[in-house]
Image: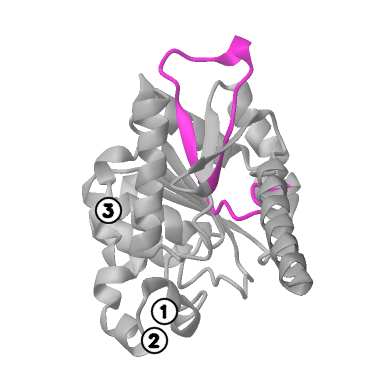
Amino acid sequence: MNWLRLILFVFIFATVFGKIAQAEAPIKELILPGEAFRVEGRPAFIFLPPKESLKKSRPWIFYSVTLPGYPDKHEKWMHEQFLAAGVAVAGIDVGEAYGSPKSRRLLTAFYREMTDKRGYAAKPCLLGRSRGGLWASSWAIENPDCVSGLAGIYPVFDLRSYPGLARAAPAYELSPQQLEARLAELNPIERIEVLAKARIPAFFIHGDVDKVVPLKENSAEFVKRYQAAGGRSLVKLVVVSGQGHNYFPGFFRCQELIDFAIGRACEAGE
């Protein structure tokens, strides 16, 4: 009987301690002033502009990929420029979801949190870094009326190039073969014309020797398809010579990208 009591005591202690530890653990570590919170049980964040920079229209940048380590210190200066211009930056951690339908539902829930509950502008500018390009583009394609612009830092648009169908398939709750059969429906690069026809401006910066997210299959292919769909004047790609998938400061201190994102976010909020 004493053993049973001991086991019960340990179980209760572990349960209570676990809940306390979870409650005290920070939702998300932020690199800039703002707020960490949860939406649909998922960690989310918002970087807040200083009071003197606040705008009545409350423009914002919808950032991805918001995994535990992102946004990171390499992006700090870039986000400081957004905040100084009165533009908030916000995102939600949907896990390694690669733009899957389930992740898009969470992104939509976060969008509603920002717009309906917090009063931010109805058309944010989307900014996708690396695999965040899959998140941003897939959601934009599904919600073109809710997007003012699409920006990217070596962004992914083709599931085949990264992470590959075998790794992406579980997030889509499909086998690799099933995902391959539905690429025309589920792979963002195959539906880029939706954004071009919606006249959504886009701006990307990408290294020409990127082996993780190849330029040709992603940003360059996006531009090619955009132009073919009548969006030639709407898209710009800056190719950085000799750079790959790395922390080269030029990716995160690209003034043209910063100005583009601020301009699109603010124009949509007016």
**Any magenta on residue 60?**
yes
The alpha-carbon separation of the residues under discs 2 and 3 comes to 23 Å
Q: Are marks 1 and 2 in contact (CB under 8 Å)?
A: yes
Q: Amino acid at mark 2?
A: Pro
Residue drawn at 47 percent across, 85 percent down:
166
Q: Position of residue 215 (x, y in %)?
A: 53, 68
**Any magenta on residue 5?**
no
Does residue 214 appear to the left or right of 59 in the view shown? right
Does residue 262 appear to the left or right of 185 in the view shown? right
Please say whether residue 130 is visible from this viewpoint: yes
Does residue 246 appear to the left or right of 162 in the view shown? right
- Could you say which is closer to the camera, residue 7 or residue 233? 7
Give the magenta-colored segment's residue range.
43-72
Seen in the picture, residue 233 relative to 100 is either above or below; the reply is above
Task: Tell me the tag on residue 176.
Answer: 2
Q: Position of residue 243 (x, y in %)?
A: 69, 64
For label 1, the residue is 169
Seen in the picture, residue 186 relative to 15 is either above or below; the reply is below
The alpha-carbon separation of the residues under discs 1 and 2 comes to 5 Å
Q: Are marks 3 and 1 in contact (CB under 8 Å)?
A: no
Q: Residues within 10 Å of mark 3 (few under 14, many from 20)?
A: some
Q: Secondary structure at mark 1?
A: helix
For label 3, the residue is 142
Q: Position of residue 184 (x, y in %)?
A: 25, 74
Query: Looking at the rendering, in which quadrant would you find the C terminus?
Result: top left
